[in-house]
Structure formats: C-alpha cells, structure tokens
Amino acid sequence: MMDNATFNELLVQAHKHCVERLINITNSKADAEDVFMDAMYAFWKNWQAGKIKHHNNLKGLIFVMAKNLWYNKKRKEQRSAVKEYATAPENISIYEGYNSDIYEEVSYNPLIKSELAALNDTENKARQKAFNAAMQRLDEKCQTLLKQSIVYKVRLKQLREKLGFVSVDAVKMAKHRCKKTLIKYYKAATNK
C-alpha cells in the first residue's frame, strides 16, 4: 500500500512530468490540469484495487492514462456532434426546400402524391445502391463487425469473443473506424 506522504510525493512528481506534455496535446493549461486530476483519481482507484502490477514508471503510466482520457473525451464530443448534426431537422432531406403549400396540396392531389412517392422511391433506391457499393468496398472483418453490431444488435462483449478482439475498447475503436470508412465510401459513391 502507498501511504499519504508517498502518494503526495508521486502527485508532485507526476504533475511536473505530465502537465507540460498534456498542454501540448490539449492546447489548454486548464484542460491539461483537469485531465491530469482525472487520471490521478483513476490511478488512485486502480492502486487501491490492486490493479496496478508494474511499479517501474508510475509517472509514465499516469501520463498515458491522462492522454487516453483526453482522447476518449474528444471522441465522445465528436460522436455527439455528429449525432446532433445528423438528426437536426434542417439536415434531414425531407425538410430540404420545404414548401408548406406543396406539401399541404399533396394530401388532396393523388397525382402529386404519386409523383413524390416515385421520386422518393428513386432516391431511396439510389441511396441503397450507393450504400451497398460502399459496404462491398469494406474488408470482410469491417463488414461483419458493422452488420453484427448495427443490424443484429450483438453486444460488444460478444463481438469481442466472436471476432477475436483483445478488448471491448478495441471493438469500439474498430467499429468507429469502419463507420468512418463506410461514410467516406458512401460519399464517394453518391458524389457528395
């Protein structure tokens, strides 16, 4: 066990070692301090639980923990920004060029209604074709990972076991990369 004096000494040494390096990553002293303190808290919890096996370079371990916390925070912010963008009404194609007069008239005029249905059907078929082409460009492991997780809703733990990943975090990272690649291929297929 680590007593308070030893922990305080480690805290001071790790602070010197980590914060300057974290400022280079976060571009902010306040963010560097925050992520350092979060890492120290996580380190202390892991130490108390006996999860830290190697005691050679504790300052380096704390730095890596802080750096990973920062990158995970940024990834979560990116994902939430993408989700907000994707579901904003102005970004959904049905709202593009919305003209209330036309859409109110649709319910009364069967000809306009059928033309819009045919147009939507054509657009949907084109999107589906582009999506299928994008999926075919992915490697087999990415295709399997995306189908299993998105279509069949297989849990990450089960995917880790099925597909031979090292950890659940590795599955998350691979899924994120596969989605990004799929989006890139889809945009190329739709020429957007």
Image (cartoon, grey):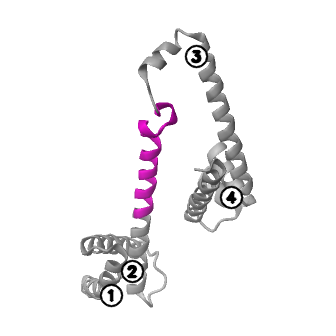
Q: How many marks?
A: 4
Q: What residue sits right under mark 3 in the picture?
A: 112
Identify the secondary structure beneath mark 3.
Answer: helix
Task: State how far apart marks 3 and 4 are (Cα).
Answer: 42 Å
Work out how far the residue at label 3 is from the one at label 2, CA to CA, in angstroms: 63 Å
| Residues drawn in magenta | 74-96
Q: Residue at x 63, y 54 (%)?
A: 188
Tell me whether the residue at label 2 lies in contact with that at label 1, contact meaning CB atoms closer than 8 angstroms: yes
Q: Nearer the viewer, mark 3 or mark 1?
A: 3
What type is the residue that disc 2 sits on? Phe
Q: Which mark is residue 17?
A: 1
Do the CB atoms of the residues marked 3 and 2 lie less than 8 Å apart? no
Query: Residue shown at 31%/78% (left/top)?
Result: 23
Query: Mark 1 or mark 4, which is nearer to you?
Result: 4
In the rendered image, which residue does mark 2 sit on?
63
Secondary structure at badge 4 equals helix
Give residue 6's quadrant in the image: bottom left
Mark 1–mark 4 Cα distance, whole angstroms, equals 39 Å
Residue named by callout 4 = 142
Q: Position of residue 37 (x, y in %)?
A: 29, 73
